[in-house]
Image (cartoon, rainbow, N blue to C red):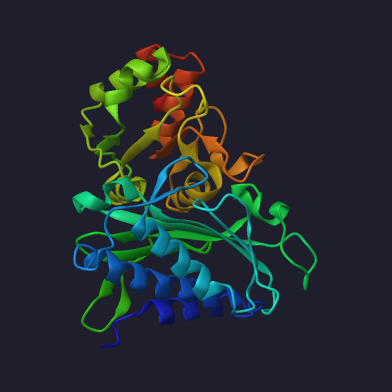
């Protein structure tokens, strides 16, 4: 039993490496794990609990909200709003910031989250997930949190992660000291450490992109995709960002969702900077990978809006850098290969 490490034990042991730590961040991470257990329970019994389907309500993105989306959002908010650990929250499903109610104290941290990524796949029993990031507030302690607290660049993230709801439920997180994965054991109701110190494999196996949109991509993206095919990578695309990212994190590869011309209202692509791209970029970099919008490191982008969208290229560092090279005009295969050799 000494080799069985629960997520609570792991988080506490990580905290001991930082004598200045107060335990507040530890508690937030454990509260997120608890929310994940509740959401996992509902995803498992969704078909029996009349949870599947749509609510008839549309979120700030103009997308119809799934019932399970709504449940996940409420579970995370209700478990975190009264603890005194957070100054404010932000959710992909809510147009404005989520303030801490007046009857509860405020804390030092900010929680941003996508409560249920991939929810369009709910009715098809495809893996879905929750993405989160934790930052320190910028506004004065003891006051209500502000939009500015939420709109911080990814380089200011202190911890981030995701929960994956699929054949098994996993929580993967980093607080800046490695990326660690935990699998929920339903017999004891606890997350157990199964993937310590995750590093993206140096040799990639997969590329993940919706090639159904090829005709809407810039020429450089089309040529980058053709280049990946010369590397003998296998195409794997689920359509749930967490699931695609998780596979490539463990197996090696690149996920990308570029801007396209399908919707003139979304010239910067589909994915949300604060709730999806930045948290996963934080994980990718701590696992030895990289993340870019095609020209700029994701963690360096200064947010201008709570629901700002961004292109995303994320995974093995060399593949992300090659994507950037294509977008900058270095489309010669020989030039790319020389660049790759020179970096080794």
Q: In this view, does 30 lie above or below 131?
A: below
Total number of numbered discs in the rendering: 0
- Residue depicted at 30% across the width and 31% down the height: 210
In the rendered structure, the answer to whether residue 175 lies left or right of residue 207 reads: right
| Viewer-nearest residue: 61 or 111 | 61
- Residue depicted at 38% across the width and 40% down the height: 316
In the rendered structure, the answer to whether residue 323 lies left or right of residue 138 reads: left
Q: Measured from the top left, where is residue 141 in percent x and y? A: 77, 70
Quarter placement of the N terminus: bottom left
Q: In this view, does 285 lie above or below 317?
A: below
- Residue depicted at 42% across the width and 82% down the height: 9
- Residue depicted at 32% across the width and 20% down the height: 214
Quarter placement of the C terminus: top left
Q: Measured from the top left, where is residue 310 in percent x and y? A: 52, 35
In the rendered structure, the answer to whether residue 208 lies left or right of residue 29 reads: left
Which residue reaches farthest front? 56
> Residue 102 appears in which quarter of the rendering?
bottom right
Q: Measured from the top left, where is residue 275 in percent x and y? A: 51, 50
| Viewer-nearest residue: 122 or 302 | 122
Which residue reaches farthest right? 140
Q: Can residue 318 be seen in this view?
A: yes
Q: Can residue 249 be seen in this view?
A: no
Q: In this view, does 285 lie above or below 254?
A: below
């Amino acid at each position: 039993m000494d080799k069985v490490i629960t997520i609570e034990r792991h988080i506490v042991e990580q905290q001991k490496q930082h004598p200045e730590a107060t335990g507040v961040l530890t508690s937030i991470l454990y509260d997120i794990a608890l929310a994940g257990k509740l959401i996992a329970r509902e995803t498992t019994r969704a078909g029996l609990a009349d949870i599947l389907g749509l609510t008839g309500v549309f979120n700030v993105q103009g997308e119809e909200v799934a019932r399970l989306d709504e449940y996940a959002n409420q579970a995370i908010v209700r478990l975190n709003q009264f603890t005194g650990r957070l100054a404010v929250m932000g959710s992909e499903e809510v147009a404005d910031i989520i303030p801490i109610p007046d009857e509860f104290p405020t804390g030092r941290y900010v929680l941003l989250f996508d409560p249920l990524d991939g929810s369009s796949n709910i009715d098809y029993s495809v893996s879905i997930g929750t993405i989160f990031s934790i930052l320190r507030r910028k506004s004065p302690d003891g006051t209500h949190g502000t939009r500015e607290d939420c709109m911080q660049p990814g380089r200011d993230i202190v911890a981030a992660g995701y929960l994956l709801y699929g054949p098994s439920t996993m929580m993967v997180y980093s607080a800046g000291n490695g990326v660690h994965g935990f699998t929920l054991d339903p017999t004891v109701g606890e997350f157990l450490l199964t993937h310590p110190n995750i590093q993206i494999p140096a040799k990639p196996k997969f590329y993940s992109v919706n090639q159904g949109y090829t005709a809407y991509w810039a020429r450089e993206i089309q040529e980058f995709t053709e280049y990946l095919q010369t590397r003998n990578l296998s195409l794997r695309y689920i359509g749930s960002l967490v699931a695609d990212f998780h596979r490539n994190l463990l197996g090696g590869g690149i996920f990308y969702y570029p801007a396209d011309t399908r919707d003139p209202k979304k010239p910067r692509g589909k994915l949300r900077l604060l709730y999806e791209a930045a948290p996963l970029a934080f994980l990718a970099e701590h696992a030895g990978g990289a993340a870019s919008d095609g020209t700029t490191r994701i963690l360096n982008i200064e947010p201008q809006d709570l629901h700002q969208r961004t292109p995303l290229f994320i995974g093995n560092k060399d593949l992300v850098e090659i994507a950037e090279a294509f977008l900058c005009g270095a489309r010669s295969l020989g030039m790319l290969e020389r660049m790759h050799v020179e970096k080794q």
